[in-house]
Image (cartoon, rainbow, N blue to C red):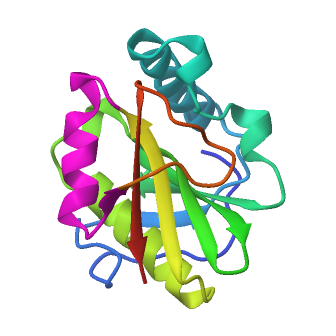
């Protein structure tokens, strides 16, 4: 298991209801998280050209403006997500991923609710994200829309790209 720090979210809290799911700030040093992020990058590369792929690797996720959380079902990594501060009022969701062993069990919704609660606690007024446009990414788009995100134009350093979809939500 990764060396995890504070900010656990016990099961049954507002951030989730899966029995045993524990969400912690993760230092990205464990083999489980490295494997999940490698799988994430491989999938992104299979569905987006290199110039349109905006997924971050382990080193990029360690930047000080990014907080990375992992979700644990006992000792098993269930999913992960990160929040990147763009400015004092705007954050971006990065690296949302559910482990293959936990797909279709609500992990992504639990992690997303955790990110939104954290963004609110930090005083952000808006949270945005970039995801892919191809069919592979439609379930992610539907997840975000179900949580109040709306389609928008590029934000931050992004540019219009036929392989990217941009979404945002006011908090």
* Rendered-image quadrant of the C terminus: bottom left
The residue that appears at 35% across and 71% down in the rendered structure is 113
User: Residue 36: x and y, percent?
Assistant: 50, 31
Q: Is residue 134 left or right of residue 30?
A: left
Q: Is residue 139 magenta?
A: yes
User: Residue 38: x and y, percent?
Assistant: 56, 22
Q: Is residue 16 left or right of residue 5?
A: left
Q: Nearer the viewer, residue 164 or 41?
A: 164
Q: Is residue 57 left or right of residue 102?
A: right
Quadrant position of residue 170: bottom left
Q: Is residue 134 magenta?
A: yes
The total number of labels drawn is 0
* Residue situated furthest right in the rendering: 64
Q: Is residue 52 above or below residue 106?
A: above
Q: Is residue 40 left or right of residue 104?
A: right
Q: What is the chief secondary structure element of the magenta stretch?
A: helix
The residue that appears at 32% across and 30% down in the rendered structure is 133
Quadrant position of residue 159: top right
* Rendered-image quadrant of the N terminus: top right
User: Residue 7: x and y, percent?
Assistant: 59, 77
Is residue 76 among what the camera can see? no
The residue that appears at 45% across and 56% down in the rendered structure is 71
Please state the extent of the stretch shown in magenta in the rendering: 133-151
Q: Nearer the viewer, residue 52 or 110?
A: 52
User: Residue 115: x and y, percent?
Assistant: 47, 69
């Amino acid at each position: 298991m990764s060396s995890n720090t504070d900010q656990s979210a016990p099961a049954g809290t507002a951030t989730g209801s899966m029995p045993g799911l524990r969400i912690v700030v993760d230092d990205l040093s464990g083999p489980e998280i490295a494997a999940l992020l490698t799988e994430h990058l491989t999938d992104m590369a299979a569905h987006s050209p290199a110039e349109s792929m905006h997924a971050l690797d382990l080193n990029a996720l360690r930047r000080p403006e990014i907080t990375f959380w992992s979700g644990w079902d006992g000792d098993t990594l269930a999913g992960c997500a990160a929040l990147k501060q763009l400015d004092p009022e705007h954050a971006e969701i990065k690296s949302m991923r559910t482990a293959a062993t936990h797909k279709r069990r609500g992990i992504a919704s639990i992690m997303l609710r955790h990110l939104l609660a954290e963004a609110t606690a930090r005083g952000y007024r808006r949270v945005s994200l970039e995801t892919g446009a191809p069919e592979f990414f439609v379930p992610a788009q539907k997840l975000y829309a179900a949580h109040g995100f709306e389609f928008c134009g590029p934000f931050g350093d992004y540019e219009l790209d036929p392989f990217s979809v941009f979404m945002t939500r006011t908090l």
